[in-house]
Structures are given as C-alpha cells and as structure tokens.
C-alpha cells in the first residue's frame, strides 16, 4: 500500500509540474501545447483572457484580433467545447454569423447536455434572430437544471415576440419548468402572457391547487377579480359543486381541505387557539371547522377568511355554529366587508358564546354598486373584561352566500 501511495503521489507531482511548465515555458509553443492538451495540460488561460480583453476593447479591429487569438487556442484544443463557444462569440462580435453558427453547432455536438454551454448557444441564436432554433435549446436546458430559469425566461420576454412560440417551442413537457415559467410571468406582471400560459398548461393537466391559487391571486392583484373567479371555477371543474350557482362561497361545509387560494378558506394559526377541519362532528355534511381556544390569550383574529367576486345586489349570508364552554363576553362572530375598500361595506354578524347546539346565523346584505370583492371572515374580537382569556371550543359549518334578488337589507 505504501508503494502504491508513493507511485500515485509521484505521478500527481509530475502532472502538476508539467502543468506549471506548460504555463510558464511552453505557453507559445504550438507543437508542445498540442501534445500537452491530450493530457489536459494546455496553457490556454492566458490566451483566452487576452481574447476577452481584445473583445472588450473599443479598437476597430478588436473583434478580429480576438478571433485570431481564439483560433490559436482552438487549434491547440479542438475537442474542448468551451473553446468552440469562445470562438463562436468572437465571430458574432466580428459580424461573421455563419462562422459563429458553425462553432455553436460544434458546441451542441460536443456537449449536448452541458447547460452553461447550451445557454451560450441559445443566446447566439437569439442574438441573430433565430428564435425557432434558440427555443428548443433553451427548453432542453430547462430539463437539465432550474439554475438558469430566470435568465432564460428573461431572454424569452426580450427576444420572443409571441408567447405562443414560447409555449410551442421553448417549454419542455416538464411540470417543474412550465410552473416556473408561469410564476416568472406572474412575478413580472405580464398579464396577457400569464393568461395564455395558464390556459395552455391547464389543458395539459399541469395545474394544481397551489398554482391555481397563485394565478387567481395574481388576477385579483391585476384588478380582474371577475377573471379570477371564472378561472377558479374552470379549474375546479366538476369539483365546484354549487359554487357560484346557488352560493358564492366555496367549500362552505369544509368537506375538503382548504386549497391555497383566495377563493378558499385561509385558516389562521396564532398562539392560543387551534383552527382545523373536524370530521367527527358537523352541522351539515360530514365535516366542520373547529376553533379550540386554550384559555391563554385575549385573541383578536380571523379564524378563517375567504374572498368572493360579487355583482351588486342583495345576498343572504347563512352559517351554522355550535359552541361548548366558550368563555368571556366575546365569542365567535362573522364579518363581511368589501375586500378592496372596507368603507363601502363592513358588517359584523352574530355573537356566539357559552354552550349551544348547532344553530343558524343569517343576515341579508346589500352589495353596493362599486363593490366587486367581498371578504367573509369567522372572527373573534378582543374582550375588554378583566377575565378576557378565551377558552372553549366553537364549530362552524355550512357557510353560504346566496343571491336573493331585489330585497331590502335587515
């Protein structure tokens, strides 16, 4: 073992020494460097750096000088795809597109799965207006790594005129990449492109609750709550039930786990209370929402909240509530307000404390002309009493918001 270690150490020392010699004594010796390149000992770094400085120069012949330097480097190391990419970029800078195209064809042949090299190749094709060649290369990169998503998508928005081309050629059949593209558009505020992308990916089955929730929330932020509601209903398909038919609240019976969407229930989880679905009791159906207070806090919070798109008119709010040992003078209430301007509409309904069996809470409200989004909340307001730390349990179920036509509020 000691002999083997000594031999390997000697080989490594000789290899390192040869590399140092290559960089110091034989840097400009072409014959020596061709041989050394076979053993990965080329002294090319100084020449590559020289070429980069030449390309950065403002001199008229700078690009041509860089081409000449990089040709020399490539002649030493013709199987290195990085050298082909370097020369291709120099040819592009010098206005020799055909020569650059040949270089990047070699890059693709030598390194078909190297993301950073393929990125340079795709960038070349975009620079010369060949988007139909750049897009499939970029699509392949997206399957290799997520590291370049933002850079690729930025290039798409700069160079590709029609989002349909991105969808057709620039995205792989890969859920991660497709979701990443939509999220990029959402973050960048590109409404029309996001709409086209959402419809495209939804048809292919790439949509899920989380992505649908992000998309409809984006539409709401873009001041299109009507589009958001329609998109959510289409996403739900047969799972929409009576939503936006007889009731404008989704999952009002808590029969399914709330989805991460503004059009489903957002459950709070502050200290001093547990808010969760409970399928051991229900006022209607099989499940309800349980709000269990620990008796340690004087809470002021919304246990559950949901927004809904509405048109002006009269609506009836309905809920079922049950309580068990709910202390203090402030129990469970319901709040309905304009989600965009609370001054237009803000009502608080009910007050349930102590212990009681399932009981209905109903209220008719008039939605004014300017209101488009309602926020419906299950709330507990703080008590002003000395013994204000709330304990006990409440359950709510069967929340509905039903359009009832032209009737007065009560």
Image (cartoon, helix red, strand yellow):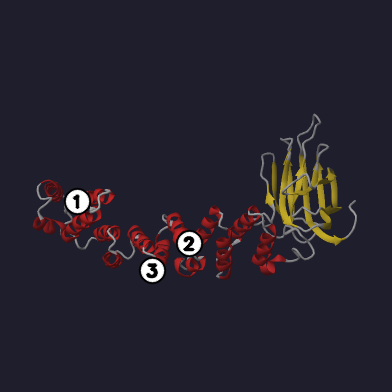
Q: Nearer the viewer, residue 296 or 228?
A: 228
Identify which residue is drawn at 41% across, 69% down: 132
Marks 3 and 2, Cα distance to the nearest angstrom?
19 Å
Q: Position of residue 327 (x, y in %)?
A: 81, 38
In the picture as drawn, the residue positioned furthest to the top comes out as 386
Mark 3 lies on residue:
133
Q: Mark number for residue 47?
A: 1
Mark 2 lies on residue:
177
Which mark is in front, 3 or 2? 3
Does any portion of residue 229 appear in the rendered image?
A: yes
Q: Nearer the viewer, residue 397 or 100?
A: 100
Q: Position of residue 190 (x, y in %)?
A: 55, 57
**Label whose residue precedes the other's in the sequence (2 or 1):** 1
> Helix, strand or loop at disc 2?
helix
Q: Position of residue 166 (x, y in %)?
A: 48, 66
**Label whose residue precedes the other's in the sequence (3 or 2):** 3
Q: Is 326 left, or right, of 66 in this rendering? A: right
Q: Position of residue 342 (x, y in %)?
A: 76, 45
Q: Is 196 left, or right, of 398 in this rendering? A: left
Q: Residues within 10 Å of mark 2 (few under 14, many from 20)?
A: some
- The image quarter in which residue 386 lies: top right
Does any portion of residue 14 appear in the rendered image?
A: no
Q: Residues within 10 Å of mark 3 (few under 14, many from 20)?
A: some
């Amino acid at each position: 073992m000691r002999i083997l270690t000594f031999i390997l150490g000697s080989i490594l020392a000789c290899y390192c020494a040869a590399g140092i010699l290559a960089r110091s004594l034989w840097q400009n010796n072409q014959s020596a460097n061709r041989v050394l390149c076979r053993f990965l000992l080329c002294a090319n770094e100084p020449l590559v750096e020289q070429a980069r400085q030449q390309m950065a120069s403002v001199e008229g012949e700078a690009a041509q000088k860089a081409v000449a330097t990089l040709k020399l480097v490539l002649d030493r190391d013709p199987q290195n795809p990085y050298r082909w990419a370097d020369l291709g970029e120099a040819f592009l800078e010098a206005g020799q597109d055909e020569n650059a195209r040949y270089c990047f064809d070699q890059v693709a042949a030598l390194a078909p799965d190297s993301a950073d090299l393929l990125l340079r190749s795709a960038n070349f094709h975009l620079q010369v207006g060949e988007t139909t060649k750049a897009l499939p290369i970029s699509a392949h990169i997206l399957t290799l790594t997520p590291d370049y998503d933002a850079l690729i998508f930025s290039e798409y928005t700069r160079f590709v005129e029609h989002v349909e081309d991105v969808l057709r050629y620039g995205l792989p059949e890969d859920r991660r990449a497709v979701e990443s593209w939509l999220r990029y558009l959402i973050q960048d505020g590109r409404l029309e492109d996001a709409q086209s992308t959402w419809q495209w990916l939804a048809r292919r089955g790439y949509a899920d609750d989380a992505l649908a929730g992000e998309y409809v929330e984006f539409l709401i932020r873009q001041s299109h709550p009507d589009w958001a509601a329609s998109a959510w209903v289409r996403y739900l398909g047969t799972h929409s039930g009576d939503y936006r038919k007889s009731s404008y609240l989704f999952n009002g019976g808590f029969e399914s786990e709330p989805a991460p969407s503004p059009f489903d229930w957002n459950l709070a989880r502050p200290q001093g209370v547990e808010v969760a679905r409970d399928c051991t009791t229900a006022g209607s159906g099989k499940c309800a929402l349980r709000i269990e207070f620990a008796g340690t806090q004087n809470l002021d919070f919304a246990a559950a909240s949901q927004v809904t798109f509405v048109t002006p008119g009269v609506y009836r709010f309905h809920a079922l509530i049950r309580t068990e040992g709910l202390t203090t003078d402030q129990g469970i209430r319901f709040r309905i307000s304009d989600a965009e301007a609370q001054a237009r509409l803000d009502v608080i309904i009910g007050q349930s404390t102590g212990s009681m069996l399932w009981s209905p809470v109903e209220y008719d409200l008039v939605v004014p002309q300017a209101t488009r989004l309602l926020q419906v909340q299950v709330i507990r307001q703080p008590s002003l009493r000395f013994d204000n730390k709330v304990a006990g349990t409440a359950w709510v179920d069967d929340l509905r918001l039903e359009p009832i036509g032209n009737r007065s509020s009560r």
